[in-house]
Image (cartoon, rainbow, N blue to C red):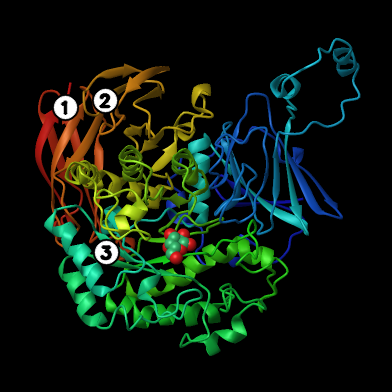
């Protein structure tokens, strides 16, 4: 065992001989040491590093870390089926349609956080198994012999299994195929700081362009350019907020696999199309895959840098190689980014296991870099994000894109993971869990079961990293008709106008909160604190939130408790302190749960006591010279000051210090005041028009 300190609070421990291809070896973004320095000083770990056990076996290697009574673990990537991982066995495999709580995920991440204030990252691209205190070693004790003597016969699974929980005192991690491993341990003082250290180790959080935090609408896959312009115009005519318009596979000449060329039949005049969309103030996002069809202009160039299996007749590029990334990214840059397209949806880069004739490449695949199919599956999404980012970096344009797979060290990439699955509870859990591993997730809205279902889903996507309506299977927006068949027959709802108004109002709420969210993302970028996060990150001591996966923090001052179709009331738990209903201003004392009601067009949104909340007059979309008119809502007599971040909202120039901060303060005698930190007024995007004391 070899221990070294990476930076304050981050230790690397090497056991045996680790393999050479791992997330750390594949990364192109280094740890953000400069900003990591501003994190609170590290506290000692709750265990001695020498207590970590290691062994190699014919199966690979095993490490075992101590867990103590009362300690819980969370994380392991985008786990859609469970939140608290204590007592679970999880096999982290990339998969597009995980059916149960097995660890299969679009974005599994071999990183966990402990409520005792530390985090552990296992640097591997292998399908690793985490036994999270789930199994008990042989006891050989008289006590267990005695307890068997008095055993009752159980007649239910609960009686048989629950009463005999296999509580163990270790986290056992089995990494297949390898004979050594690097572990990275992130110190507290608490779970939140440990998470921040992991994100800074990954290179920091991402800062989306300002427009990325508006609404993204993806149109019907069969739409041609006129249909797309018509729909885009419709949103503007109806004043429905929308910043980004997404084109689904129909824009491409050959899409499964991709040749990355416009479809001349559907989009015969792309210059006109692009100009029409840009004139209306839209950003464009193109659906793509990473698989390269033989008709792609760069197919031959990519051949030497591709794996030995095809997917949908297309090459699987070895994007761990800079040659492959350069080819990919040059095409993106020359053909799309240069023409003003600022977003991509990287589809089907996960894996397919559970269907007949799985469409993806097998684990036995071989790639020119020496990677095998298992390593490539774990890394493919993240490498794709890197290839995409390369072009945007070159153009000095920020993107806010989508990618259906991700893995470790992905926090600097502004790509929200999404899914074809659709269980609403699982989607909400995705928002709660993703950030525990430095991921972004969108619980996208598609066709729905009912108006109720549609509105509840829109509520939860408005309070998520990306407000995405993925209407790729329907001609008309889902608020005009939620039912797919009727929608495509243009049979609209009788109350379409009313439903549209409710959805529009929700999108406006998102736009009103945009300055608050943008500033929270700036905090994520520089300090690694995710914006949408599980309550356990902020309140790890509170046992009531340890497995709470139905409500979450939105920035530092808001807490959202979503509802799903068919429910107009639910239990809401308030952590310590006072909380205020955003709409009614009713005050709730923390440390307890309340049964609260919310009709279908109402939300359960709460503000932390003593908050200054910037709330903007909603705009329909972001423009280069945007200036928000902001009312500062004052909750409590001694609110904490609030920082509003602004920069040009589009480029990476903020990295060279080109940003501005507006500091809001309130005191009972003089009321509100705002101070601009720099003198560069051109960057300021906020005009404080009013202060409203709420109680
Ligand atoms: C799916 C993807 C959908 C949609 C579709 C288009 O795999 O998850 O969101 O883009 O492809 O063919």
SS of the residue under disc 1: strand
Circles 2 and 3: CB atoms closer than 8 Å: no
**Which of the marked residues, 2 or 3, is nearer the chain's N terminus?**
2
Report x, y in % for residue 134.
72, 34
- Given this view, does label 2 or label 3 mark the residue nearer the observer? 2
Count of labels in the image:
3
- Given this view, does label 2 or label 1 mark the residue nearer the observer? 2
Q: Which numbered dot is residue 667?
A: 1
Q: In the image, 514: left or right of 576? A: left
Please identify the quarter of the rendering in which residue 181 is found: bottom right
Please identify the quarter of the rendering in which residue 85 is found: top right
Please identify the quarter of the rendering in which residue 264 is found: bottom left
Viewer can see residue 681? yes
User: From the viewer's perspective, is residue 321 above or below residue 24?
Assistant: below
Residue denoted by label 2: 581
Label 3: few (<14), some or many (≥20) within 10 Å? some
Report x, y in % for residue 67.
69, 32
CA–CA distance in space, label 2 to label 1: 22 Å
Q: In the image, 74: left or right of 674? A: right
CA–CA distance in space, label 2 to label 3: 34 Å
SS of the residue under disc 2: strand
Q: In the image, 556: left or right of 410? A: left
Quadrant of the rendered image holding ligand 1 = bottom left
Residue denoted by label 3: 650
The residue depicted at 12 percent of the width and 58 percent of the height is 237
Viewer can see residue 189? no
CA–CA distance in space, label 3 to label 1: 35 Å
């Amino acid at each position: 065992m070899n221990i070294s300190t990476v930076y304050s609070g981050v230790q690397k421990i090497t056991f045996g001989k680790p393999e050479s291809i791992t997330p750390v070896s594949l990364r192109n973004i280094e740890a953000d040491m400069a900003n990591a320095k501003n994190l609170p000083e590290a506290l000692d770990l709750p265990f001695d590093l020498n207590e970590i056990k290691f062994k190699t076996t014919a199966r690979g290697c095993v490490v075992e870390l101590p867990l103590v009574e009362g300690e819980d673990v969370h994380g392991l990537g985008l786990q859609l089926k469970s939140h608290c991982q204590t007592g679970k066995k999880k096999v982290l495999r990339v998969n597009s349609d995980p059916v149960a709580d097995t660890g299969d995920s679009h974005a599994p991440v071999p990183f966990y956080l402990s409520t005792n204030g530390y985090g552990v990252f296992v640097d591997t691209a292998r399908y690793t198994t985490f036994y999270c205190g789930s199994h008990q070693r042989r006891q050989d004790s008289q006590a267990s012999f005695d307890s068997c003597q008095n055993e009752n016969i159980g007649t239910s699974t609960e009686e048989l299994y629950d009463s005999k929980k296999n509580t163990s005192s270790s986290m056992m991690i089995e990494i297949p195929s390898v004979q050594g491993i690097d572990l990275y341990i992130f110190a507290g003082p608490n779970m939140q700081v440990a998470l921040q250290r992991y994100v800074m180790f990954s290179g920091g959080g991402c800062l989306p362009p300002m427009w990325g935090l508006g609404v993204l609408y993806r149109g019907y896959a069969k739409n041609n350019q006129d249909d797309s312009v018509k729909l885009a115009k419709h949103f503007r005519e109806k004043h429905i907020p929308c910043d980004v318009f997404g084109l689904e596979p129909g824009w491409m000449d050959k899409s499964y696999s991709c040749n990355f060329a416009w479809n001349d039949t559907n989009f015969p005049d792309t210059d006109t199309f692009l100009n029409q969309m840009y004139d209306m103030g839209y950003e464009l996002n193109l659906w793509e895959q990473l698989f390269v069809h033989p008709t792609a202009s760069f197919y031959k160039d990519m051949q030497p840098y591709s794996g030995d299996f095809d997917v949908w007749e297309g090459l699987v590029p070895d994007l761990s190689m800079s040659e492959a990334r350069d080819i990919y990214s040059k095409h993106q840059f020359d053909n799309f980014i240069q023409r003003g397209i600022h977003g991509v949806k990287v589809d089907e880069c996960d894996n397919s296991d559970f269907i007949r004739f799985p469409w993806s490449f097998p684990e036995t695949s071989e790639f020119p870099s020496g990677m095998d199919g298992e390593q490539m599956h774990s890394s493919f999404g993240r490498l794709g994000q890197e290839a995409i980012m390369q072009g945007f970096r070159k153009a000095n344009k920020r993107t806010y894109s989508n990618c259906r797979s991700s893995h470790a060290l992905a926090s600097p990439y502004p790509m929200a993971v999404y899914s074809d699955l659709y269980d609403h509870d699982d989607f909400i859990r995705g928002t709660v869990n993703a950030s525990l591993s430095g991921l972004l997730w969108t619980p996208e809205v598609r066709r729905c079961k009912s108006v109720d279902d549609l509105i509840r889903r829109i509520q939860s996507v408005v309070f998520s990293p990306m407000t995405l309506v993925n209407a790729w299977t329907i001609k008309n927006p889902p608020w005009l008709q939620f039912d797919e068949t009727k929608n495509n027959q243009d049979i609209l709802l009788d109350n379409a106008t009313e439903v549209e108004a409710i959805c529009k109002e929700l999108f406006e709420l998102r736009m009103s909160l945009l300055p608050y969210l943008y500033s929270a993302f700036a905090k994520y970028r520089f300090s690694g604190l995710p914006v949408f996060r599980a309550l356990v990150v902020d309140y790890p001591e509170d046992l009531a939130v340890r497995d709470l996966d139905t409500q979450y923090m939105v920035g530092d001052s808001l807490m959202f408790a979503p509802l799903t179709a068919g429910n107009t009331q639910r239990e809401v738990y308030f952590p310590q302190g006072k909380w205020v209903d955003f709409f009614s201003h009713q005050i709730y004392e923390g440390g307890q749960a309340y049964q609260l009601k919310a009709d279908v067009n109402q939300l359960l949104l709460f503000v932390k006591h003593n908050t200054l909340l910037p709330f903007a007059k909603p705009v329909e979309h972001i423009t280069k010279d945007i200036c928000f008119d902001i009312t500062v809502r004052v909750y409590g007599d001694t609110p904490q000051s609030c920082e509003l971040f602004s920069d040009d909202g589009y480029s990476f120039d903020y990295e060279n210090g080109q940003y501005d901060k507006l500091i809001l303060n309130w005191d009972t005698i003089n009321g509100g005041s705002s101070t601009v930190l720099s003198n560069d007024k051109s960057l300021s995007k906020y005009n404080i028009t009013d202060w409203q004391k709420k109680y």
